Image (cartoon, rainbow, N blue to C red):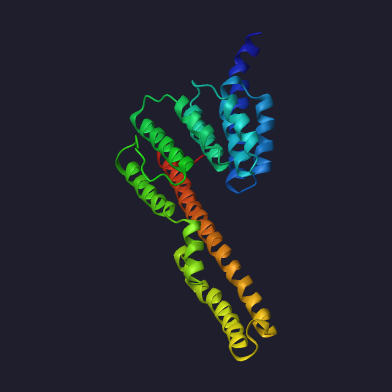
Amino acid sequence: MKRILFLMPLFSFAITFSQDKELLFAKYLYEKGFYDNASLQLQLMRRSCGEEQVDSLTYYSGLCMEKMWLSDSAISLYNVLEPENEYYDHSRFRLALIFASKKNYTGSLAVMDSLKLDNACNEDLRLYFADAFSLLSKKSASKHAFSCKGTFSGKLEEYSGTLALNKRRSPFMGGLLSALIPGLGRVYAGKPRLALSSFIPIATFGLQAWEGYRKQDGFKSARFWVFGSVATLFYIGNIYGSALSVKIVKQERYDIVENQVMLDLRLSLRDLYGRDW
């Protein structure tokens, strides 16, 4: 009996050492990009590990799911973590980013609002995340009050100004300008190179129609009706295309701002917490 009691600490140490080696192997797989294998390794470890390791393995499994674009699985794993867990705060930020990547800014804001942080740095980051998600949800708000301060606020004010300028672009105005002068709406949309490609066909067919009307039988001229019809089709298409170009360019500019904001959020999260694993 005494011999067994003597061997118990050695047995416990051997198990812990083995688990540490398995965790290092899972981390190695994760860093090399073998996320499915790392996830499988972590899953096997969760079946046999002690309660003190379950939460960390759950968090690491969530990271693997994110890398494999299995966002619903990552959300389920992150939601398992309790507030007293050391990975809880970090997982909340990552959970908010997942919702934001799905354009679910309401869900992201709800996660940030439910997160209570005592650390000042963490709280600043939480406010930054909440302000960023609020800005992206309003998409083109001309005025926005931010709760975060310092460099965080400065970045968001810059993005807010870009979105405010983007908001002023009107598809209706683009179509109207192209109705007045074909191609001008393309310039308004921010695509001046397309202006000539809109103007030249309309001008060419229009001149051909005018020549047919002037030199032949007026309205009875077949040349007038053929080229006039083609010019009219190009003219109407130019108006619609210019309005659509403004709409597309606005979405492209918003996407650029959104991607930059999301990148800034991820970098800020890494600056505070370090590497994910």
Image quarter for residue 113? top left
Q: Nearer the viewer, residue 186 or 161?
A: 186
Task: Give the mark count.
Answer: 0
Q: Residue furthest left?
A: 150
Q: Is residue 23 visible?
A: no
Position of residue 173 in the picture relative to residue 215 (left or right): left
Q: Residue 93: image x %, image y %?
A: 48, 34
Q: Nearer the viewer, residue 133 or 207?
A: 207
Q: Residue 36: image x %, image y %?
A: 68, 42
Residue found at x 49% / y 63%: 176
Residue found at x 63% / y 71%: 233
Q: Residue 196: image x %, image y %?
A: 51, 77
Q: Is residue 122 visible?
A: yes
Position of residue 266 in the picture relative to residue 39 (left or right): left
Q: Residue furthest top?
A: 1
- Which quadrant would the N terminus be assigned to in this image? top right
Image quarter for residue 272? top left
Q: Residue furthest bottom?
A: 215
Residue found at x 66% / y 30%: 45
Q: Nearer the viewer, residue 73 or 153?
A: 153
Q: Residue 167: image x %, image y %?
A: 43, 51
